[in-house]
Image (cartoon, rainbow, N blue to C red):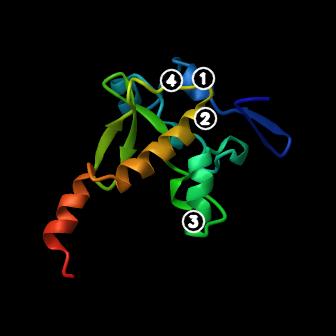
């Protein structure tokens, strides 16, 4: 079943907190009008059946067996627009309007991970300027 994670005998809809506007618990959630997903299930790992071809190749090139540091990267929203948070620049990177996002949260998260990596490797990333200015060799 799409959007469902099975953990033991418990069945969990991964989209439940995104689809349910009722019950915003924290002050921050009330302020931004959406749930902060990681507060609910920090053990929710990516569904590798939904991995994008780019991420598959990325893991192969890096020699990794899993997404490791990308497991807590999720599709969020900045000013009502889909975005992914880049911790390196401490800011949101908006998803281009040309990308048609799927309904399933796990699929959106995989796209967010892919776009974050591509942005971090691009010449448009702010850290590229810093590296050029401060690199020793």
Q: Secondary structure at mark 3?
A: helix
Label 4: few (<14), some (14–19) or many (≥20) C-alpha neighbours in 10 Å: few
**Residue under label 1:** 103
Circle 2/circle 1 CB separation < 8 Å: yes
Q: Label 2, label 1: how many angstroms apart (C-alpha)?
A: 8 Å
Q: What is the number of the mark on residue 49? A: none
Mark 2 or mark 4, which has the lower sequence index? Answer: 4
Q: Secondary structure at mark 2?
A: helix
Task: Give the residue at x 62% y 36%.
Answer: 106
112 to the left or right of 81: right
Residue 22 on image: x %, y %: 53, 17
Quadrant assignment for the N terminus = top right
Label 2: few (<14), some (14–19) or many (≥20) C-alpha neighbours in 10 Å: many
Q: Secondary structure at mark 1?
A: loop
- Whether residue 67 is visible to the viewer of this picture, yes or no, is no
Label 1: few (<14), some (14–19) or many (≥20) C-alpha neighbours in 10 Å: few
**Residue under label 4:** 100
76 to the left or right of 58: left
Q: Label 1, label 3: how many angstroms apart (C-alpha)?
A: 29 Å
Label 3: few (<14), some (14–19) or many (≥20) C-alpha neighbours in 10 Å: few
Work out whether 88 lies above or below 18: below
């Amino acid at each position: 079943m799409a959007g469902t994670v099975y953990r033991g005998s418990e069945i969990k809809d991964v989209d439940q907190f995104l689809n349910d506007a009722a019950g915003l618990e924290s002050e921050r959630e009330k302020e931004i009008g959406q749930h902060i997903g990681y507060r609910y299930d920090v053990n929710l790992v990516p569904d590798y059946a939904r991995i994008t071809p780019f991420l598959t190749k990325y893991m192969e090139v890096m020699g990794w067996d899993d997404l490791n540091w990308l497991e807590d990267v999720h599709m969020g929203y900045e000013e009502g627009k889909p975005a992914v948070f880049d911790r390196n620049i401490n800011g949101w990177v908006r998803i281009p309007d040309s990308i048609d996002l799927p309904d399933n949260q796990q699929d959106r998260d995989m796209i967010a991970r892919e776009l974050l990596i591509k942005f971090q490797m691009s010449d448009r990333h702010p850290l590229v300027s810093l590296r050029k200015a401060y690199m020793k060799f």
